[in-house]
Image (cartoon, rainbow, N blue to C red):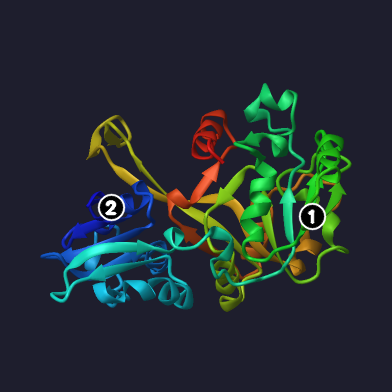
Amino acid sequence: MDKLQDICTEEGIKVREAIQRLDSGRHKILIVTKHRKVTGIVTDGDVRRWILRKGSFDADISELMCRTPKTIYEDQVSSAKEIMLNARIDAIPVINNADELVDMIFIRDLVQNEVINYQKIDIPVVIMAGGKGTRLSPYTSILPKPLMPIGAKTILERIIDSFQKNGCSSFLLTLNYKKNLIKAYFDDKEKDYEIGYVEEEDFYGTCGSLCLLTDKINGTFFLSNCDVLLDIDYAKLYEFHREHHNEITAVTSLKHFQIPYGIFELETGGAICKISEKPEFNYQVNTGIYVMESTVLGEIPRGKVYQMTDLLDRLMREGRRVGAYPVTENCWKDMGELNEMHKMLDAFQTS
């Protein structure tokens, strides 16, 4: 079956290849087999735990995978929906009496998205929607970036939808550029959530506007840029943040880069000391989505340009808890630049 070919790999591959296969596929899961028998499973959660343990990307997949995946036999297929909903898993392998993989069942094929059993966490969501969006010019000369249509909805509505599936119902927008257009659009729209606005007097950078929230937010809240989408369960992100007692948890995306050339390292005077043939690098990239505690809001100076990196650096220097929540590259969509916006448009062209 084509589906099984897309999600299956034999034992023996490296972690690096497993992550690349997980990202290039559309199913967000990789089944590891040996002579057709299921020996393990790899999900984005396994990748996240591996990264946080600082595991090697050159290690064998057997060190990364879950060795005790939940499976069902062919005569249990009728119970697959109930099993997956109760276990809060997205997919389950089907095996025969010889323990060989014969099929894969996905929860999305059995239930509508809105009835999937997402844990409800009704905490506020702040969306920073005040920037000029200069990298999307000339489009943003006419429309502010938050109102850019991605399929049948604006990017801002898609961001709100992504949080609503976990029960979030209170949204606060920080506004500046073309703010009246954004307010008019949402004030004229029927909606099943609350939305409020905080207006900057000037452009205060990627973090400066948060100083305006000190009397509006109390406790934990999500913070999102207005040009990114994550396909994740936000309840798991929230649980991770609480378990690690972080003041800020930044969602990061694993990015793999390969230099398509041989690289020379030089000594003083021009002698070559090292040669690397098409080296590969892995980095954790900031997605622009965070979980934060309101205790950090008082650290942001009023009326000044202040970047998120300034805030993170300050907290880390003071020994306060700042953590990362890694996700795979395929979970993150970004429309901050024109070529990335076109990719997002392609992904949502029918919805």
* Tag 1 near tag 2, CB within 8 Å: no
Query: Which residue position is annotated with label 2?
Result: 3
Can residue 84 be seen at all in this image of the molecule? yes
Q: In this orientation, which residue lies closer to the viewer: 185 or 249?
A: 185
Q: CA distance from mark 1 to mark 2?
A: 41 Å
Query: Which residue position is annotated with label 1?
Result: 172
Q: In this orientation, which residue lies closer to the viewer: 347 or 14?
A: 347
Say few, some or many: other residues with alpha carbon within 10 Å of mark 2 (under 14 / 14 to 19 / 20 or more). few
* Residue 246: quarter of image: bottom right
Q: Amino acid at mark 2?
A: Lys
* Residue 96: quarter of image: bottom left
Residue 128 picture location, percent across and down: 73, 48
Give the left or right position of residue 79, taking residue 15 as reference. Answer: right
Q: Is residue 301 above or below residue 111?
A: above
As drawn, the residue found furthest toward the top would be 138
Badge nearest the viewer, 1 or 2: 2
Residue 320 picture location, percent across and down: 64, 70
Can residue 226 be seen at all in this image of the molecule? no
Say few, some or many: other residues with alpha carbon within 10 Å of mark 1 (under 14 / 14 to 19 / 20 or more). many
* Residue 351: quarter of image: top right
Residue appearing at x 17%, y 63% in the figure:
11
What element does badge 2 sit on? helix
Give the left or right position of residue 281, taking residue 325 as reference. Answer: left
Q: Is residue 26 above or below residue 265?
A: below
